[in-house]
């Protein structure tokens, strides 16, 4: 009768053990290990089809998942960005291309790009800044207009947390809409844009509080400047796709270009600027959208008082691990006075506020 592989293996190792008694235990050990691998191998061979179909299902699932693209890009390691914190945390503002943390290779690309922008080939990094006077002039007012109203608004604005406890926040409130990488702009989200200076638009319901805040700041001696309010989704998308093409022309693959682009431009559909609820605000003496703005008197004033007018620092320091966006002391989001008071009082970012109250 023909011996099975198993019997042959046993016979071989027993033979070795008999010939030399010192090899008795090593032979038994070797036999066990060999048989183990023999059975494991045989299991995979006989179940080959089953495993193959499982692998195909897995590939199909991962491939069709909307998050896979970025994940693949992250893993390929082509930019040699280690999976560091700074590589994962982005910025929400297009104009920050040069500030965003990037790998050395991409820095070269970004520098080239910045050079081009400086020459005015593209309009995306062009800074348009508007002071309170510009804005009031646009509305046909004198700069002193409504100062009393600003004062009144400033004093009435703050509510204590005890009062707040009784407020019921509503998840469908337009002021509280949550927009981030995990929560794109909701389908059918509707809003009306209003102009507050020539070419400067935001959600029209925000303008009144914005003006009151700027007037109050001015009264305290600070000239705030609005830099980048509403951006259209088309603009954001064009911007995104243009950058991808640009990087591809330098020899990067689509995946590589996507990865580099997503580090410097907010993925379209995930920016609060696209719904007119975000404003980048700095001062006349510090126009850059940089961390250093937090240390200016104007930055400090905004951090202390913006909530009185319904605005929050949307991406606070030490909340990067929640927001996935670097600290942006200039990026203000309108959430309404009640919610802003709660967030300020309890040191919550918008994501945390949602967890707790909505
Ligand atoms: Zn911004």
Image: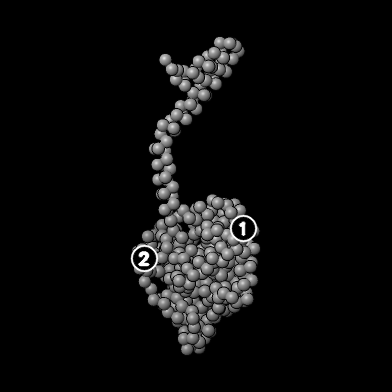
Residue drawn at point x = 64 percent, y = 63 percent: 108
Residue drawn at point x = 55 percent, y = 58 percent: 253
Q: Which of the pair 305/260 is nearer the observer?
A: 260
Report whether 99 appears left or right of 205.
Answer: right
Q: Which mark is residue 204?
A: none
Q: Which of the pair 104/297 is nearer the observer?
A: 104
Please give the residue where the numbered disc 2 appears in the rendered image: 187
Residue 209 visible from this viewpoint: no
Q: Which of the pair 40/325 is nearer the observer?
A: 40
Extreme front residue here?
1
Please give the residue where the numbered disc 1 appears in the rendered image: 103
Report whether 223 appears left or right of 202.
Answer: right
Q: Say what secondary structure mark 2 lies in.
A: loop
Quarter of the image with the N terminus in it: top left
Give the image location of residue 55, x and y in percent.
Answer: 43, 43
Q: Say what secondary structure mark 1 lies in.
A: loop
Give the image location of residue 302, x and y in percent.
Answer: 53, 71
Report whether 328 appears left or right of 205.
Answer: right
């Amino acid at each position: 009768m023909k011996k099975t592989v198993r019997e042959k293996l046993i016979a071989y190792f027993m033979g070795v053990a008999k010939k030399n008694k010192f090899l008795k235990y090593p032979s038994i050990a070797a036999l066990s290990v060999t048989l183990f691998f023999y059975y494991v191998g045989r299991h995979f061979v006989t179940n080959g089809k089953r495993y193959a179909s499982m692998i195909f299902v897995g590939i199909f699932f991962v491939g069709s998942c909307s998050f896979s693209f970025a994940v693949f890009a992250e893993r390929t390691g082509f930019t040699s960005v280690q999976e560091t914190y700074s590589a994962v945390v982005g910025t929400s503002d297009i104009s920050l291309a040069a500030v965003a943390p990037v790998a050395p290779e991409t820095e070269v690309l970004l520098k080239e790009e910045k050079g081009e922008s400086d020459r005015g080939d593209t309009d995306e990094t062009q800074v348009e800044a508007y002071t309170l006077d510009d804005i009031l002039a646009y509305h046909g007012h004198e700069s002193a207009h409504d100062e009393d109203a600003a004062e009144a608004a400033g004093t009435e604005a703050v509510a204590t947390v005890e009062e707040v406890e009784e407020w019921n926040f509503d998840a469908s409130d337009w002021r509280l809409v949550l927009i981030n990488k995990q929560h794109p702009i909701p389908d059918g989200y509707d809003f009306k844009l209003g102009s507050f200076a020539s070419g400067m638009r935001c959600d029209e319901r925000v303008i009144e509080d914005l003006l009151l805040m700027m007037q109050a700041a001015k009264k305290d001696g600070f000239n705030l400047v609005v830099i980048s309010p509403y951006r259209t989704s088309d603009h954001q998308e064009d911007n995104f796709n243009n950058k991808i093409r640009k990087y591809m022309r330098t020899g990067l693959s689509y995946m590589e270009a996507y990865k580099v682009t997503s580090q410097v431009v907010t993925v379209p559909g995930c920016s609060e600027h696209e719904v007119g609820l975000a404003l980048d605000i700095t001062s006349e003496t510090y126009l850059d959208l940089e961390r250093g703005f937090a240390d200016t008197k104007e930055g400090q004033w905004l951090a202390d008082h913006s909530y009185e007018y319904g605005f929050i620092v949307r991406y606070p320091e030490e909340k990067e691990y929640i927001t996935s966006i670097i600290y942006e002391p200039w990026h203000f989001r309108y959430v309404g006075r009640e919610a802003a008071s709660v967030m300020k009082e309890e040191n919550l970012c918008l994501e945390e506020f949602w967890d707790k109250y909505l």
